[in-house]
Image (tube, helix red, strand yellow):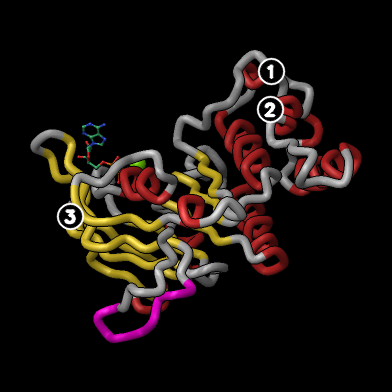
Amino acid sequence: MLTGRTIQSKGGTNHQNYLFHLDNLSVEYGNLKALKSVQLTIYPGEILFVTGPSGAGKTSLLNILGGNLTPTSGKAVLPHERSAKHFVASVFQDLRLLQKKSCEDNVWMAYDSSLYTNKNEFYKELEDLARILNLYDHLNRKIEDCNGGLKQKVAMIRALMSKPTALLADEPTSSLDKENSYRLFEVLNHYNHKKGLTLVWATHNKELIKQFPGKIAHLDQGRLVYSGHACFI
Ligand SMILES: Nc1ncnc2c1ncn2[C@@H]1O[C@H](COP(=O)(O)OP(=O)(O)O)[C@@H](O)[C@H]1O
Ligand SMILES: [Mg+2]
């Protein structure tokens, strides 16, 4: 079993406590190099914004972290492959919601009786999140009748309520206005503080990054050109 105990950074720091580790990792689609020799370590409880222009490799990076894409070369050590106690939830750009079902029914897809004492506990959290995110009045609406912003909220609530170790979100506020984006991020920040949720968020939203503490992994044409604290960009 991979434990990660043997991996050392170039500076000699022991990385035994990391959650994700990408080592010299590349992804190619035919002749196109989408990720080039990426070296990245993500620790438990971190908030990491993945930034970069369109086509830089953000979605490919999130797909690697979620275990949905196999690297062409290099290595990806992922928490859910190391231990069954870890669950990594992904919110993809296409959201993957059931169009004919209601918002509430889509969230209930995250219900797992081993994670909640009973259905009341699940519903209470669902209700709280729906109220905070201005979704409560739309819970009975079918997804096919919702706008993009409502759909993004449903997908994020569903992912959060699966109680993941880490949440990977691919531009989850692209259809939300400023206030709703901030509200959503405040909720995620709360789960980060209270429950240790690790958050990896691909975004173009510079205002959001400035507002909230976190690290940045900036990609440019598949290369990780900056990795560190947001205050340095
Ligand atoms: N399935 C695929 N097949 C071929 N090329 C792809 C595929 N997915 C992404 N690409 C290409 O890989 C590059 C990186 O894409 P992507 O990871 O989606 O970047 P971003 O999310 O930053 O826009 C882009 O040039 C894109 O066109
Ligand atoms: Mg993308």
As drawn, which residue projects farthest toward the front? 1
Mark 3 or 1 closer to N-term? 3
Q: Earlier in the sequence, mark 3 or mark 2?
A: 3
> In this rendering, which labeled residue sits more in front, label 3 or label 1?
3
| Residue 130 circle label | none
User: Can you tell which mark lies on residue 106?
Assistant: 2
Query: Which element type, helix, strand or loop, lies under badge 3?
Result: strand
Identify the residue position indicated by label 1 in the image: 101
Q: Looking at this rendering, what residue extends furthest in the top direction? A: 100
Q: Main secondary structure of the magenta part?
A: loop
Answer yes or no: disc 1 within 8 Å of ligand 2.
no
Residue at left 24%, top 80%? 10
Q: Where's residue 165, x and y in %?
A: 59, 56
Q: Residue at x 55, y 51 (%)?
A: 167
Query: Between residues 145 and 106, which one lies in front from this camera angle?
Result: 106
Residue range corresponding to the magenta coloring = 9-17
Dot label at residue 36: 3
Q: Amino acid at mark 2?
A: Asn
